[in-house]
Amino acid sequence: MPLLAKQCGTCRTGKQAMGGLSMDSIEALQKGGKHGAALRPSVSAESLLFQYVPGEKTPRMPLGNSLDATAVG
């Protein structure tokens, strides 16, 4: 999760993570925030994380930035 920590950690860690979504752990990603589970291991295409980062859902994340497609894989 180093890429997420670097790109998303400012807004998505700690007790006051934006939108209630903490990226402090895999468990926190699976729990999700106000829009639901960010990570669904058995159905990654339905994972919000995999929808917001490439821009399938808006706003594209991380806000004001984008991740290099090769880094996301």
Image (tube, rainbow, N blue to C red):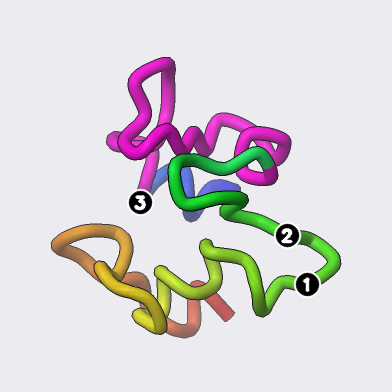
Task: Give the residue furthest to the top.
Answer: 15
- Report the predominant secondary structure element of the magenta stretch: loop
- Identify residue type, mark 3: Gln
Residue 40 badge: 2
59 drawn magenta: no
Circle 1 packing at 10 Å, graded few (<14), some (14-19), many (20+), is few
Q: Are marks 1 and 3 in contact (CB under 8 Å)?
A: no
Of badges 1 and 3, nearer the viewer stands 1
Taking 73 as reference, is 43 left or right?
A: right
Q: Nearer the viewer, mark 3 or mark 2?
A: 2
Residue at position x 55%, y 30% in the image = 24
Q: Which residue is mark 1?
A: 43
Front-most of residues 38 and 67 = 38
Magenta span covers which residues? 8-30
Rendered image: mark on residue 66:
none
C-alpha span from label 2 to label 1: 6 Å
- Find the residue positioned furthest to the right: 42
x%, y% of residue 14? 42, 20
- Vertical arrangement, residue 6 with respect to residue 62, above or below: above
Amino acid on which the number 1 mark rests in the picture: Val
Q: Earlier in the sequence, mark 1 or mark 3?
A: 3
Can you tell which mark lies on residue 7?
Answer: 3
Locate residue 35, reporting x and y percent. 46, 51
Q: Secondary structure at mark 3?
A: helix
Say if mark 2 contacts mark 1, CB within 8 Å.
Answer: yes
Identify which residue is drawn at 42% across, 16% down: 15
Of residue 62 and residue 47, the one placed in the foreground of this image is: 47
Q: Residue 41 appears at what percent x and percent y?
A: 79, 61
